[in-house]
Amino acid sequence: MKIIVTSLFVEDQDKALEFYTKKLGFVKKHDVPTGEYRWITLVSPGEQDGTELLLEPNVHPAAKDYQKKIVEEGIPATMFGVADIHKEYKQLIEKGVTFTMEPTKMGDVTIAVFDDTCGNLIQIIQQ
């Protein structure tokens, strides 16, 4: 068994698609109409067969409450791995990404947290 798709609640699918592709560099794999919304998945560059990130509309009241509460508590919705966190941090700052936590050493790893502008905090980690 392996993880093939994981989802992330977003307030606006178009805004999220632009942020995750233009600012973070993910690649759109699927964009399929499903009625009022779309099945939009992204993959890491160079990994078309890798785990897909689904940009899930947060239209359900439970999803909205969940998203709001974890942001209020400063809890990241997901985590992305990076090879060089200081380089990634600098590049994302230059693209206008707002960080809530600068790169911080935590034991054997270094983490940073940013706002995805779509209702989530996202953590990046260098192991």
Image (tube, rainbow, N blue to C red):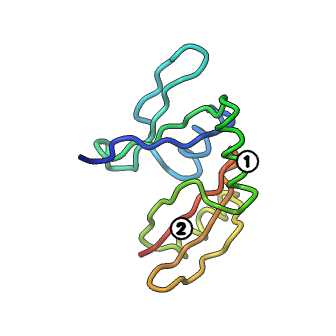
Q: Is residue 73 left or right of residue 89?
A: right
Q: Residues within 10 Å of mark 1 (few under 14, many from 20)?
A: some
Q: Is residue 112 left or right of residue 26?
A: right
Residue receiving disc 2: 88
* x and y, in percent, of residue 2 in the image: 27, 48
Marks 1 & 2, CB-CB < 8 Å contact: no
Position of residue 25 relative to residue 60, above or below, is below
Residue receiving disc 1: 68
Residue occupying the point 39% across, 49% down: 45
Residue most extreme to the top: 35
Residue occupying the point 49% across, 31% down: 40
Numbered label attached to residue 54: none
Q: How crowded is mark 2: few (under 14 residues within 10 Å), some or many (20 or more)?
A: some
* x and y, in percent, of residue 55 in the image: 54, 37
- Give the camera-side residue of 50 and 62: 62
- At label 1, which amino acid type do we have? Lys
* x and y, in percent, of residue 74 in the image: 70, 63
- At label 2, which amino acid type do we have? Glu
Residue most extreme to the left: 1
Position of residue 94 relative to residue 86, above or below, is above
Query: Which quadrant of the figure has residue 96?
Result: bottom right
